[in-house]
Image (tube, rainbow, N blue to C red):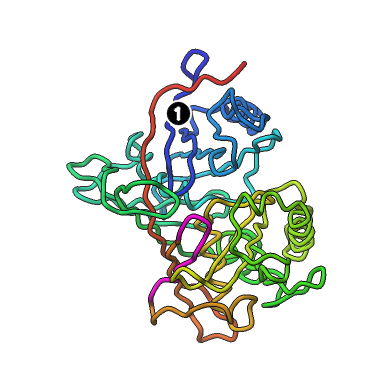
Amino acid sequence: MIGSGVRCMLMRGGTSKGAFFLAEDLPAGPAARDDLLLRVMGTPDPRQIDGLGGAQPVTSKVAVVSPATGPDRDVDYLFLQLGVGEPTVSDRQTCGNLLAAVGQFAVERGLVSAGTGRTTVRVRLVNTDAIAVSTFATPAGQVGYTGTTAISGVPGTAAPVELDFTDTEGSVCGSLLPTGWVRDEIDGIEVTCVDNGMPVVLARATDLEVTGYETTDELAADRALADRVQSLRTQAGALMGLGEVSTTSVPKTTLVAEPRDGGAICTRTFIPLQPHPSIGVLGAVSVVTALLLPGAVGHDLLVTPPAGGPVEVEHPTGKLAVAVELDRSAALPRVRRSTVLRTARKLFDGTVFPRS
């Protein structure tokens, strides 16, 4: 703590924005920590006018980073999703978008030494106990944020960040297909429930009486759709072993449709009921993993990429390329690795003053 303020770095990671803290700069107890972070973000308030939050879930996020607690990683990363209009703090999922900035933050704060040219940081995702490897530019031993890589949903270009995931299969629910089936039926709608780093419920958009090509504003205005999504996800949550999920942010719900912009599949995602302006990194990884499984909902809609090539996932603001490598030698395919390319940028570094 610095006076009445807290040392903080605001960073964009992928298509999300969040406040990054060293664990040592926050209260040790979860209750005191969460109370402080709600005041930092300006929650509860739909506008978050008195805090750092940007009035939507993708900008009401926090990363808590600490030195490694094991030999197979460099740093630990705890993700916290803060509510906007409601005073909630959830650690039930991780965030692959903010992950794109965790390695750089670790270098900036001196937890990891920068390499010459490029640096690789092994990150333990505390929420799911998985390991991700982040590789990014460090010209002259300093983090480089400038580059020519563009990602959908973010204006301009920046330096590329390679995210490589292993051991994410079933990291929240315990198995890739947590219900035990590649398809289930809820409310008369066929769904696939999957967890490859993020619990997701997949359904065809047309089965929920939408096209799957609507804008986020059009989806947000459809209250009947929100009710159906909530019914699907709460029942799926119980089937997936997540218990009562009506007030939590997982599982996510993704509606799929045939691609129409040169990609492999078109998606519309809800977190949990608000339409996502794009799609989360690990949400996309789980969606692509499911779509690669014969018999899964949406498998027949997928335009299969060349062998070994990434799957281009269309979303409301563009595309996200995801590569998932499966081991199909067993009766049930296993996930070997997943790779996503993102960008990140430091927005400010200093002291944040939470409301009293």
The picture quadrant where one finds residue 319 is: bottom left
Residue ID at (55%, 85%): 330
Q: In which quarter of the image is the C terminus?
A: top right
Could you tell me residue 146's position as x and y percent?
A: 26, 44
Residue ID at (44%, 21%): 351
- How many C-alpha atoms fall within 10 Å of the one at disc 1: few (<14), some, or many (≥20)? some
Along the viewing direction, whichever of 175 and 42 lies nearer the viewer: 42
Instruction: Look at the image and tell me whether residue 49 can be seen.
Output: yes
The picture quadrant where one finds residue 39 is: top right
> In this rendering, is residue 240 above or below 152?
below
Residue ID at (38%, 59%): 341
Give the amino acid at mark 1: Cys
Instruction: Look at the image and tell me whether residue 337 can be seen.
Output: no
Along the viewing direction, whichever of 166 and 40 lies nearer the viewer: 40
Numbered marks: total: 1
Residue ID at (46%, 17%): 2
* Residue 312 drawn in magenta: yes
Could you tell me residue 153's position as x and y percent?
A: 45, 51
The picture quadrant where one finds residue 101 is: top left
Along the viewing direction, whichever of 128 and 223 lies nearer the viewer: 223
* Residue 213 drawn in magenta: no
Could you tell me residue 310's position as x and y percent?
A: 41, 71
Secondary structure under the numbered disc 1 in the rendered image: strand
Could you tell me residue 284's position as x and y percent?
A: 52, 62
| Residue farthest right in this picture | 187
Q: Kindly report the secondary structure that dominates the magenta region of the rendered protein.
A: strand
> In this rendering, is residue 336 above or below 355?
below
> In this rendering, is residue 118 above or below 180?
above
**Bounds of the magenta span?**
309-318
68 left or right of 90 in image:
left
Which residue has dot 1 on it?
8
